[in-house]
Image: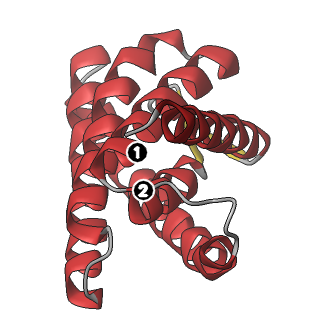
Amino acid sequence: MGQKHQTRWLAIIAVIIAFNVALSYVVKIPVPATNGFVNLVEAGIFVAAMLGGAKSGMIVGGLSGLLLDLFAGYPQWMFFSLIIHGLEGLVVGYFGFQKQLLSQVVGLVVGSNIMVIGYMLAGTLLYNWTAGVASIIGNVAQAVMGLIVALILMPIFKRLPQINLK
């Protein structure tokens, strides 16, 4: 990858991360049982992964999750978010980038399950198993909301030549 292309890719990734953190910070629903919140971070992760592949999804996922938790006042979650959302983006990008619809659906479902199970385990480690289990419904809702927003945004971003992550 040439220096010019790599710089362009990095700039686009940085803008997606910034937009994703801002969108997720504005639209957040607190979940008292887990001292966390439901947001739209999945939307940006899914878009970056589907448009740019596993590497883009992993970077956007990990950094968006980490920064969002840090800025929103939930630092106890930020390293969990780095790993969980990073893996989610990696899987969605691996299965979904320039692939058939069935492969994209598999990637989105598996990635979403990684997020839901990851946060259930993280909630259990940070608090207790009740908090971990209590997080499941909110995280499923978060994945579904992110999927809906991503499906709305994908056709728009695909038409923009400036948003070419490959």
Total label count? 2
| Foreground residue among 160 and 142 | 160
Location of residue 114 in the rendering, given as x and y in whole percent from the top left corner: 22, 49
- At mark 1, the secondary structure is helix
Q: Residue at x 63, y 43 (%)?
A: 12
Residue 56 is tagged as 1
Q: Residues within 10 Å of mark 2 (few under 14, many from 20)?
A: many
On screen, residue 67 above or below 32:
above
Are the residues at dot 2 and dot 1 in contact (C-beta closer than 8 Å)? yes
Q: Quadrant of the N terminus?
A: top left
Residue 52 is tagged as 2
Residue type, label 1: Ser
Residue type, label 2: Gly
60 to the left or right of 104:
right
Q: Residue furthest top?
A: 75
Q: Residues within 10 Å of mark 1 (few under 14, many from 20)?
A: many
Q: Residue at x 41, y 65 (%)?
A: 50
On screen, residue 143 above or below 32:
below
